[in-house]
């Protein structure tokens, strides 16, 4: 009887120790990954390209004046974006020409535009990809 009770207690302690160790390791690696994902503003600026103000017509005859910052995933990708400036502007103008005022209204419309531009611009990149597109100025008339 004593032997069975002792065996059960040892097994229970081993299980508790294993769960505690697994929890500590999970938390440690999760926090490390979270810190790695957070970038300082200086790192972001080193990989960001400005797209100066673009004024163009939308599909419904409205006019938009808009500017962007495009964040690349590396310095090499930033350099490529700078060289592909005319292609980036072309993608933006063509994308906007398919949109209506309703498509671009509100937060969701602007987030959708940012995501669409991110995907389209990334598709022409050879050295890296676009991490994020930021709308820095927008006037819809």
Image (cartoon, rainbow, N blue to C red):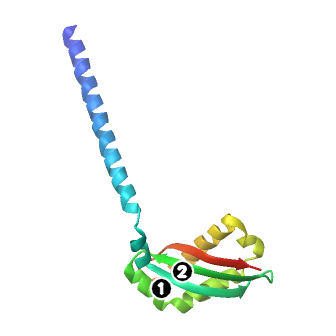
Q: Is residue 89 above or below residue 14?
A: below
Q: Nearer the viewer, residue 40 or 82?
A: 40
Residue found farthest to the top: 1
Residue 74 placement (x, y as % from top left): 39, 77
Residue 30 placement (x, y as % from top left): 37, 51
Q: Which residue is mark 1?
A: 81
Report crowding for label 1: few under 14, some 14 to 19, many 20 or more residues within 10 A (C-alpha).
Answer: many
Q: Secondary structure at mark 2?
A: helix
Q: Which mark is residue 100?
A: none
Image point (43%, 73%), residue name: 44
Q: Nearer the viewer, mark 2 or mark 1?
A: 1
Q: Which residue is mark 2?
A: 121
Which label's residue is closer to the chain start, 2 or 1? 1
Q: Secondary structure at mark 1?
A: helix
Image point (55%, 92%), residue name: 86
* Label 2 to label 1: alpha-carbon separation: 9 Å
Mark 2–mark 1 contact, CB under 8 Å?
yes
Would residue 51 be found to the left or right of residue 73 on screen? right
Image point (59%, 76%), residue name: 136
Residue 128 placement (x, y as % from top left): 42, 78
Would residue 76 be found to the left or right of residue 125 on screen? left
Report crowding for label 2: few under 14, some 14 to 19, many 20 or more residues within 10 A (C-alpha).
Answer: many
Residue 124 placement (x, y as % from top left): 51, 83
Would residue 123 be found to the left or right of residue 99 on screen? left
Q: Nearer the viewer, residue 6 or 97?
A: 97
Image point (27%, 38%), residue name: 21
Q: Which quarter of the rendering shows the N terminus?
A: top left
């Amino acid at each position: 009887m004593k032997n069975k009770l002792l065996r059960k207690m040892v097994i229970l302690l081993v299980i508790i120790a294993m769960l505690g160790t697994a929890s500590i390791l999970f938390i440690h690696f999760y926090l490390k990954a979270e810190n790695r994902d957070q970038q300082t503003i200086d790192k972001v600026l080193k990989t960001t390209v400005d797209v100066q103000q673009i004024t163009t017509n939308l599909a419904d005859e409205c006019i938009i004046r808009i500017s962007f910052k495009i964040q690349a995933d590396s310095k090499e990708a930033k350099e490529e974006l700078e060289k592909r400036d005319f292609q980036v502007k072309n993608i933006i103008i063509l994308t906007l020409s398919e949109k209506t005022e309703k498509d671009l209204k509100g937060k969701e419309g602007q987030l959708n535009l940012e995501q669409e531009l991110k995907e389209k611009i990334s598709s022409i990149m050879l050295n890296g990809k676009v991490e994020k597109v930021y709308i820095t100025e927008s006037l819809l008339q």
